[in-house]
Structures are given as structure tokens and as C-alpha cells.
């Protein structure tokens, strides 16, 4: 068991908003975006965890995403009607944050139901 945990620990990278299971560098979105597909570790600061197949979100990450959604919603409310480009970009960011929060909540509910 310890050997299995040690092996998995080598590919697990902890970020403030997600965990990165860096098992296949060719699938790492951060490396694709940076143009460094042969890197041996993720660029956690460039992580777009809502789009990367190697990123996972857990209950401990929920506050980061919920705060981000709240701040983005506040900015959206302050934009004037002429700021269409900014509104489109922020709306997509807001929608993504809400989706991640909903996925974290759904996973938590599933875990609670399974343990009941």
C-alpha cells in the first residue's frame, strides 16, 4: 500500500484551487498553452483546472471558486452596457466558476448519500 501511495504522490501536485494528477504530460493543458509539452511537471500557476482533464476539484477548493464567482458577479454588475467584450469574457468566467462549485457540491452530495 505504501508503495502505491508513494508512486501516486510523485504525480500529485497541490494547487490552491485544484489538485493536478500529472500522469500524462501530453494531456496537461498548462503545458499545451505554454508550448512546453515535454516538461516534467505542471505549470500550476497557469492551470485552467476547469478545462484540464488532469485537474480535480475537492471540497477544500470550494471557497476559492465560490469567492471567485462572487467577485466576478460583482464586476459584472458594475459593467456598463457598452462593455460587451468585457461582459462576454467575465460571464464565461462566472459561468465556469459556478459550474465548478456545482460539481464540487454534487460530488459531496454523492459521497454523503453513499455513506448514509
Image (cartoon, rainbow, N blue to C red):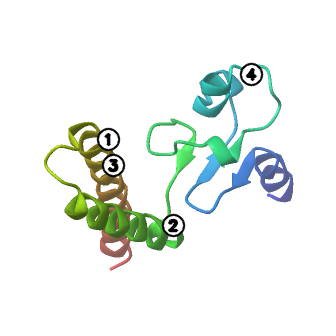
Please identify, in this view, whether the residue under mark 4 or under mark 1 is nearer the observer. 1
C-alpha distance separating marks 4 and 3:
25 Å
Percent across and percent down for residue 51 are 45, 37
* Quarter of the image where one finds residue 84: top left
Q: Measuring 52% from the left and 42% from the top, which residue is drawn there?
A: 48
C-alpha distance separating marks 2 and 4:
27 Å
C-alpha distance separating marks 3 and 2:
14 Å
Percent across and percent down for residue 49 are 51, 45
Nearer-N-terminus badge (4/3): 4
* Quarter of the image where one finds residue 5: bottom right
**Label number found at residue 36:** 4
Nearer-N-terminus badge (2/4): 4
Nearer-N-terminus badge (3/2): 2
Q: Secondary structure at mark 2?
A: helix
Q: Tell me if label 2 and label 4 are in contact, CB under 8 Å.
A: no
| Image position of 84 (left or right of 59) | left
CA neighbours of label 4 inside 10 A, class few (<14), some (14 to 19), many (20+): some
| Image position of 22 (left or right of 41) | left
CA neighbours of label 1 inside 10 A, class few (<14), some (14 to 19), many (20+): few
Q: Secondary structure at mark 4?
A: loop
Nearer-N-terminus badge (1/2): 2
In the picture of the structure, the residue carrying the numbered disc 1 is: 89
In the picture of the structure, the residue carrying the numbered disc 3 is: 96
Nearest the eye: 82 or 42? 82
Q: Secondary structure at mark 3?
A: helix
C-alpha distance separating marks 3 and 1:
11 Å
Nearest the eye: 57 or 68? 68
In this rendering, is residue 71 above or below 20?
A: below
Q: Secondary structure at mark 1?
A: helix
In the picture of the structure, the residue carrying the numbered disc 2 is: 61
Please identify, in this view, whether the residue under mark 1 or under mark 2 is nearer the observer. 1
Percent across and percent down for residue 24 are 68, 28
Amino acid at each position: 500500500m505504501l508503495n502505491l501511495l508513494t508512486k501516486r504522490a510523485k504525480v500529485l501536485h497541490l494547487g490552491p484551487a485544484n489538485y493536478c494528477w500529472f500522469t500524462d504530460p501530453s494531456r496537461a493543458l498548462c503545458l499545451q498553452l505554454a508550448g512546453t509539452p515535454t516538461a516534467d511537471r505542471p505549470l500550476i500557476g497557469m492551470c485552467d483546472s476547469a478545462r484540464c482533464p488532469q485537474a480535480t476539484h475537492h471540497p477544500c477548493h470550494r471557497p476559492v471558486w465560490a469567492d471567485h464567482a462572487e467577485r466576478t458577479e460583482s464586476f459584472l454588475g458594475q459593467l456598463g452596457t457598452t462593455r460587451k467584450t468585457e461582459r462576454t469574457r467575465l460571464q464565461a468566467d462566472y459561468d465556469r466558476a459556478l459550474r465548478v462549485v456545482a460539481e464540487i457540491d454534487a460530488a459531496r452530495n454523492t459521497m454523503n448519500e453513499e455513506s448514509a
